[in-house]
Image (cartoon, helix red, strand yellow):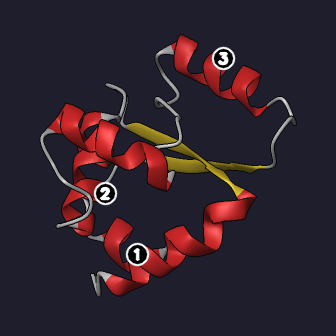
Amino acid sequence: MGGLFHKLRHPRRCYVVCTIPRSGSNLLTDGLRATRRAGMPKQFFLPKSECGYGADIGLDPNTDYSGYVRGIVNSKTTHNEVFGFKLMSWYLDDFLARLRATHA
């Protein structure tokens, strides 16, 4: 994922839960969030959810995707500097294409 993520305020640790439906990933990510030390992994980059998360942080992913990604990383990193997010395999390619299109 290189470019854009490397230019952000760097959490000490960053991870992605890349999964398929009905695999238990909600149980895993709910548990990680509950620790309050392992990031707040959710599907921040699911296209149909981005506008909602963007509204929460005051950014529009449709007009400034790199700003949206930065805003999510900055607002969803736990106090010990861990950022995590969840991606389903079926929209991984679209997410990567959008990151590449930012030229960041």
Q: Is residue 1 above or below residue 25?
A: below
Give the residue displayed 35% in from the left and 35% down from the top: 77
Asked which secondary structure carries label 2, the reply is: helix
Whether 98 is drawn above or below 71: the answer is: below
- Residue 5: horizontal and vertical position, in percent? 37, 66
Residue 36 numbered mark, or none = none
| Residue behind mark 3 | 31
Q: Secondary structure at mark 1?
A: helix
The quarter holding residue 64 reads: bottom left
Check disc 1 and report the residue beneath it. Answer: 99
Image marks 2 and 1: residues in contact by CB distance under 8 Å: yes
The first of marks 2 and 3 along the sequence is 3
**Neighbour class for label 3 at 10 Å: few (<14), some, many (≥20)?**
some
Residue 18 visible in this rendered orientation of the protein: yes
Instruction: Answer above or below: position of 85 versus 1.
Output: above
Residue 9 in view in this figure: no
Question: In this rendering, would 22 be left or right of 100?
Answer: right
Looking at the picture, which amino acid does disc 2 mark?
Val
Tell me if label 2 and label 3 are in contact, CB under 8 Å: no
Residue at 83% of width from left, 29% of height from top?
24
Q: Amino acid at mark 3?
A: Gly
Between marks 2 and 3, how big is the CA–CA gap?
Answer: 23 Å
Proximity of marks 1 and 3: CB atoms separated by less than 8 Å: no
Taking the image as shown, residue 75 lies to the left or right of residue 83, namely: left
Q: Nearer the viewer, residue 52 or 86?
A: 52
- Residue at mark 2: 69
Q: Amino acid at mark 1?
A: Leu
Q: Earlier in the sequence, mark 2 or mark 1?
A: 2
Instruction: Tell me the SS state at disc 3.
Output: helix
